[in-house]
Image (spheres, grey):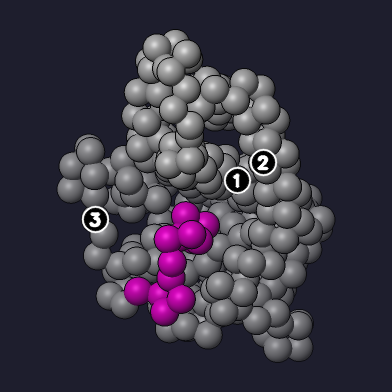
Amino acid sequence: MILFVIFISTIVYVFSRALGYGLSFVGFALILSGIMSIGSYYYSDKLVLAMSGAKEIQKKDNPKLFNTVENLCIGAGLPEPKIYIVDDPSPNAFATGRSPNHSVVCVTQGLLDTLNQTEQEGVIAHELSHVKNYDTRLMGIVAILVGFAVIISDIFLRSLWFRGNDRENSNAQSVFLIVGIVFAILSPIAATLIQLSISRKREFLADASGALLTRYPEGLASALEKISSYPRPLKNANNATAHLFIINPFKGKEVKSWFSGLFDTHPPVKERIKILRSM
């Protein structure tokens, strides 16, 4: 996270020097990032749920699911989250919310229909671990930084069209201008790679924390096998929320090489299962 902030600060500094705006561009960038941060902090969970087509349910709608969540929350020392269901036959789940007191666990109908009780417990324990480890907040912050890098890069490239021909400063700014153009092209890609790398590491942590909570790693391992083997993708799957799910909701995207693995939202399922079964 520290490196990410340094990365964003460097981008803003280079763009500011290249455009000859000094600290004014930096100030504008900080104000913009502040507005994005506040909005995302309070409303990102609602946007994610809306994009996923999730509907909140009450205990009377599915007492078994509520009892499972309640029991695991007691074991984890967490307040009970709101529970949402996505009406989709593809088994999957995710958690969202800015803190344990404002958290949501969402599962698909396909997950309830496909997995047995111990497998459901493994999945829900994994998602509650995301909440307890504050992964939902962390990924929200990272998403803001990635979006910030994309927006600032776009503003810089557009500003080049309106930049005056200042001959007095052209020699001094030429190096920063060249570096700025390179940064504008590569920084969104680099920011996305950092986001995906953090997401993959947090999945490993949630697997381990979930196994610790249930004391039965095989339940989650078996669930991951069933979820990953389901052939159809999630209907409302999109790139903005794919990293939140326990398994990539886009089916058929297997990591074939080290380079392609850099762009994957999740660690390889086989590797996760292998680690779980070695516990």
SS at circle 3: loop
State yes or no: discs 1 and 2 in contact (Cβ < 8 Å).
yes
Along the viewing direction, whichever of 89 and 238 lies nearer the viewer: 238
Residue 97, numbered label: none
> Label 1, on which residue?
144
SS at circle 1: helix
Image location (x, y in percent) of residue 150 = 48, 44
Q: Residue at x 47, y 22 (%)?
A: 166
In the depicted structure, whether residue 18 falls above or below residue 121: above
* Closer to viewer: mark 3 or mark 2: 2
Q: Which residue is farthest top? A: 172
Mark 2, other Cα within 10 Å: few <14 / some 14–19 / many ≥20 = some
> Label 3, on which residue?
254
The mark that comes first in sequence, 1 or 2, is 2
Along the viewing direction, whichever of 214 and 272 lies nearer the viewer: 272
Q: Residue at x 76, y 88 (%)?
A: 60
Q: Amino acid at mark 3?
A: Glu
* Closer to viewer: mark 1 or mark 2: 2
Side of 43 relative to 258 (left or right): right
Along the viewing direction, whichever of 217 and 109 lies nearer the viewer: 109
Q: Amino acid at mark 2?
A: Ser
Quadrant (top left/top right/bottom left/bottom right) for the N terminus: top right
Q: Amino acid at mark 1?
A: Ile
Q: Which residues are magenta?
A: 233-245
Mark 3, other Cα within 10 Å: few <14 / some 14–19 / many ≥20 = some
Whether residue 231 is in magenta: the answer is: no
Side of 137 relative to 251 (left or right): right
Secondary structure that dominates the magenta span: loop
The mark that comes first in sequence, 1 or 3, is 1
> Label 2, on which residue?
33
SS at circle 2: helix
- Per the model, the C-alpha gap separating discs 1 and 3 is 27 Å
